[in-house]
Amino acid sequence: MSKLENDTLLRALCRETTEYTPVWLMRQAGRYLPEYKAIRAKAGSFLTLAKTPELACEVTLQPLRRFALDAAIIFSDILTVPDAMGLGLYFAEGEGPRFERPLRDEKAILSLPVPDPEIELRYVLDALRTTHAALGGRVPLIGFAGSPYTLACYMVEGSGSNDFRAAKTLRYTRPDLMHHILDVTARATTAYLNAQIAAGAEVAMLFDTWGGNLAFDDYPEFSLRYAEQVFAGLDRQARGRTVPRILFTRHGAPWLDRMPGSGCDAVGLDWSSDPRTARTGIGARVALQGNLDPTCLFAGPESVRVSVRHTLDAFGPAPGHVFNLGHGIAPSTPIDSVETLVEEVHTYSRALRQTG
Amino acid sequence: MSKLENDTLLRALCRETTEYTPVWLMRQAGRYLPEYKAIRAKAGSFLTLAKTPELACEVTLQPLRRFALDAAIIFSDILTVPDAMGLGLYFAEGEGPRFERPLRDEKAILSLPVPDPEIELRYVLDALRTTHAALGGRVPLIGFAGSPYTLACYMVEGSGSNDFRAAKTLRYTRPDLMHHILDVTARATTAYLNAQIAAGAEVAMLFDTWGGNLAFDDYPEFSLRYAEQVFAGLDRQARGRTVPRILFTRHGAPWLDRMPGSGCDAVGLDWSSDPRTARTGIGARVALQGNLDPTCLFAGPESVRVSVRHTLDAFGPAPGHVFNLGHGIAPSTPIDSVETLVEEVHTYSRALRQTG
């Protein structure tokens, strides 16, 4: 087993007892940090940053120098996978991500390849190797990918969208083609996450950002089923340790009780989900991660303390909680709020364990 | 009691037996209709259309000429109320709604007035009176307002937003001021809906478009409580008939079981909510409205038939279901899909009642 100074996150994800509640933040490496903005400006573009292993490593480590976070998460983007499949990812100035060649016809869909991660996604794996070495076992390193459904939404639509109309229309008109995209993407994602695990990722997380835009009966068929396919193909052990899996579906509250069936070890909750119901329900089967409203960080340190305590009280001191936001941290979030958050999670959760 | 040829909607909202499932569509008067686009172009702006009673009446009636809908809903906008409160509603070209004077300081918040609907919102009431007369009792006329929380989001933010950061920050830093806005807005909304009922509205609906952006514990305190305040103040009877109330919260799945406590007669479900769970749960206390995914209308008539039947099967034939979309109809929705939807709801729900 490789050395790990702080394995609190891994133990919490396996629902083992920990001395305090571990904490990391979705998008903890990002635009709220001046040192991130500086390196991002120097790199010239987001993609240069993501595709240069030394720079990706550097921004992954930046938040750990400021805050006592219990994990690092590799700096990357979920759309690297469709990019590696040949769709041509780019960022239009002032807009979100776009693809040069979105999937709009049957021929393109049926010829979609499963990329070899050590070739087409080597820059991510190099970033993981560099970061894993640089961390030197201080905290675990989280690897991640987009869920097949979330990737399919972008791949068909060609960009972000309010309603992903093109993607949803394909689901209704040609469910067979949608399932084909999802299957190929699930295979690509499995290979990609296994390569991340081999390169140093100690946790594997699936971000299902758009699963919550599905009709109730469609989520199990078009999103959860492919998360399950990915988890079923993942290596369970690496470097002598279990590699826990986290599944996060934004607006996933209607399907929380089904998510443990996917084979994940932990379910991420957004801030509209009820921690108490989740703890007494699926909390018997999986760990839970979440779920502070990220906008509360704009209200200043004192308000953050109140909200952190409220969230920790709601989850309670039993094993199996990882503190996080309910969504990614926003670009202009005040740094002192983040500092207060991390500190308060550690202090208050230790106290809770003594009194609770 | 005033004459009403088709009272199927009213009976379904009161959970009485009906011969078929009544249907209307959120945003049924709108940009997918060429006759709407023509009148909108002639009017020059959305606000001119909304503020001219004869034009608002005309576009309210347009979808009823094409489709066998079981209700009309007055053409208007939820932001007329903050406009009447002095915030200055306008639409920037190609963008969404904006306010000239968003609520950004304590003084503005504390001096927020409750408008007299017969003065500041007279154009809506005139549109209702004209439309009620023009309908001649053919189908019921639905009046509506935004929920106090949804209005407060726009009023503080000054526009639509991905995260309503300014509004949420006020909730965290100065909950007292947020509650003040919500209380004043609830009183304004109560007076407005009562005036709509007096002017001819036979159903009162609250659109809680942004309630779903609240943290789990915040929804009851910041959204539902003020919906309850509005419903508690509404006239229960008009023209010899009960005026049913509908509450719709987008992304409201986490709180469905609490909504009947607001005093509504029906809860609107978005398409991610489970009709079966709702029927066996809150369906014992309230009627349910919903919940077809509006993007399925882009997939053509045959696909629409399948989806309509799937939805009707999920709700089942018991009394207390009003068919609707799970969100507003999209601008470029094909008209033949809408025609198929309405026809299939009527045909298939009649058949279900005979076999079920």
Image (tube, coloured by chain):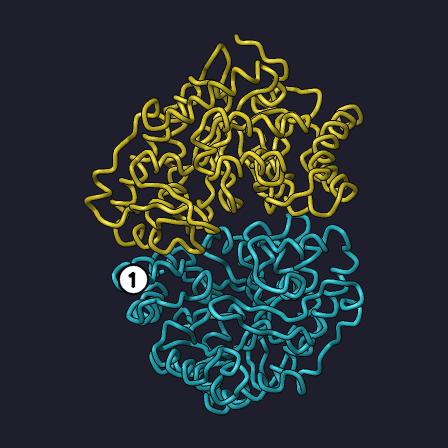
Chain colours: A cyan, B yellow
Whether residue A227 is visible = no
What chain does mark 1 sit on? Answer: A
Percent x, y of residue B305: 76, 39
Q: Which residue is mark 1?
A: A305
Quarter of the C terminus of chain A within the rendering = bottom left
Image-based side of A99 in relation to A142, left or right: right
**Residue at 25 percent of width and 45 percent of height:** B177
Residues B74 and B353: in front is B74
Percent x, y of residue B121: 37, 28
Image-based side of A349 in relation to B293, left or right: left
Q: Secondary structure at mark 1?
A: helix
**Residue at 38 percent of width and 41 percent of height:** B151
Amino acid marked by disc 1? Arg
- For residue A113, above or below residue A166: below
Image-based side of B101 in relation to B126, left or right: left
Residues B274 and A323: in front is B274
Q: Residues within 10 Å of mark 1 (few under 14, many from 20)?
A: many
- For residue B347, above or below residue A8: above
- For residue A261, above or below residue B209: below
Whether residue B263 is visible = yes
- For residue B120, above or below residue A117: above
Residues B293 and A249: in front is B293
Percent x, y of residue A111: 79, 72
Looking at this view, name the residue that lies furthest to the top: B1
Quarter of the N terminus of chain A within the rendering = bottom right
